[in-house]
Image (cartoon, helix red, strand yellow):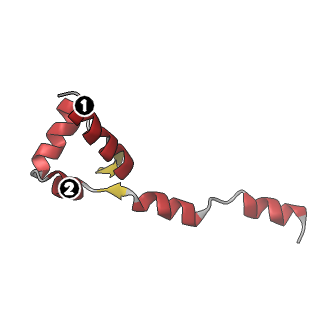
């Protein structure tokens, strides 16, 4: 294998890492279920209370880690 071939292979994104990262993202419906609230409340929490969100195309996606952190911050602020 030449250095050029090795270099081109190593510069490609790691597909498994990308898929793994996406597995940790939740939909609005899933966040609503976790929080025990309607989907409309999730949108309200994003807009009015800083619930961290990523917009991917027209979809909102939430990091499980950031959601846990946000929930913990809400407990501390009371």
Q: Is residue 34 above or below residue 52?
A: below
What residue would you read off at disc 2? 34
Q: Is residue 37 above or below residue 8?
A: above
Label 2 neighbour load within 10 Å: few <14, some 14-19, many 20+: few
- Residue in the picture at 48% in, 62% down: 20
In the rendering, at what x and y percent does residue 27 appear?
27, 56
Is residue 21 found left or right of 60 in the rendered image?
right
Q: Nearer the viewer, mark 2 or mark 1?
A: 1
- Residue in the picture at 74% in, 60% down: 10
Question: Which of 23 and 70 lies nearest the eye of the viewer?
Answer: 70
Label 1 neighbour load within 10 Å: few <14, some 14-19, many 20+: few
Measured Cα–Cα span from mark 2 to mark 1:
19 Å
What residue would you read off at disc 1? 76
Q: Going from the N terminus, do you reach mark 2 or mark 1 first?
A: 2
Q: Quadrant of residue 13?
A: bottom right
Is residue 48 found left or right of 21 in the rendered image?
left
Task: Quarter of the image for the C terminus: give it.
Answer: top left
Q: Are marks 2 and 1 in contact (CB under 8 Å)?
A: no
Q: Is residue 15 above or below residue 27?
A: below
Please, which residue is most extreme toward the top here?
Answer: 77
- Residue in the picture at 22% in, 38% down: 46
Res 57 visible: no
- SS at circle 1: helix
Q: Quadrant of residue 69?
A: top left
- Residue in the picture at 56% in, 66% down: 16
């Amino acid at each position: 294998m030449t250095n050029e071939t090795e270099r081109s292979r190593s510069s490609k994104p790691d597909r498994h890492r990308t898929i793994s990262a996406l597995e940790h993202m939740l939909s609005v419906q899933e966040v609503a279920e976790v929080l025990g609230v309607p989907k409309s409340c999730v949108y309200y929490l994003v807009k009015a209370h800083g619930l961290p969100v990523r917009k991917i195309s027209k979809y909102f996606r939430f990091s499980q880690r950031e959601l846990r952190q946000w929930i913990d911050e809400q407990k501390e602020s009371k």
